[in-house]
Amino acid sequence: MMLCLLNKFGDFCMMRMLLAHMILKARYFPHDHIMTIEVGTKPNFTWHSLWGTREIIQKGSRWLIGNGEKVRIWTDRWLARPYSVMPITTGQIVNSNILVAELIDKDDGVWKEQVVRSIFLSCDAEIICSLPLCHS
């Protein structure tokens, strides 16, 4: 009986969080990602508080690749290593908006290893080729 009530309470809390997310998204970032927008004018207390935590969240987070279509190679945090989550560059970056999807063979759902190894330092290439991809 107690577990049933606890489970219902958990479901209720999850529904409230989902509803809060839907309301905040509709009002403050309907077409963008929460990490890329400004606080806006006259934000409510909840939104202003959440928006204020973005910097802390960004410092401790990185992208999971999936299909790579939203992750920029040179400016987003996406590599899994302790000292830096962005690739090390050895020269000038020609296009800072190029996406990780360009490094993935979409037909087979694997990394284009030759391309990866030709662009990145060997330490980065090893990390990149070991990252799991979404096979959808």
Image (cartoon, rainbow, N blue to C red):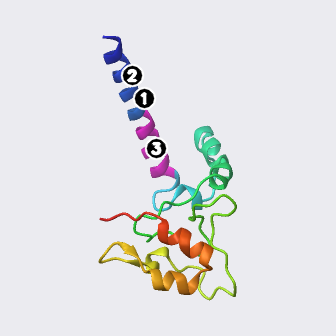
Say which label, 3 or 2, has the lower sequence index: 2
- Label count reads 3
Residue 80 image offset from top left, x and y in percent: 57, 61
| C-alpha gap between disc 3 and disc 2 | 18 Å
Q: Is residue 72 visible?
A: no
* Residue 13 badge: 1
Q: Classify residue 78 as left or right of residue 12.
A: right
The residue at the point 55 percent across, 68 percent down is: 127
Residue in front for this viewpoint, 25 or 111 = 111
Amino acid at dot 1: Cys
The residue at the point 50 percent across, 76 percent down is: 99
Residue carrying label 3? 21
Per the image, is 101 magenta?
no
* Element type where label 1 sits in the image: helix
Q: Quadrant of the N terminus?
A: top left
Residue 9 image offset from top left, x and y in percent: 39, 22
- Bounds of the magenta segment: 16-27
Q: Classify residue 81 as left or right of residue 135.
A: right
Q: Is residue 80 above or below residue 92?
A: above
Residue carrying label 2? 9
Amino acid at dot 2: Phe
CB-based contact (under 8 Å), mark 3 and mark 2: no
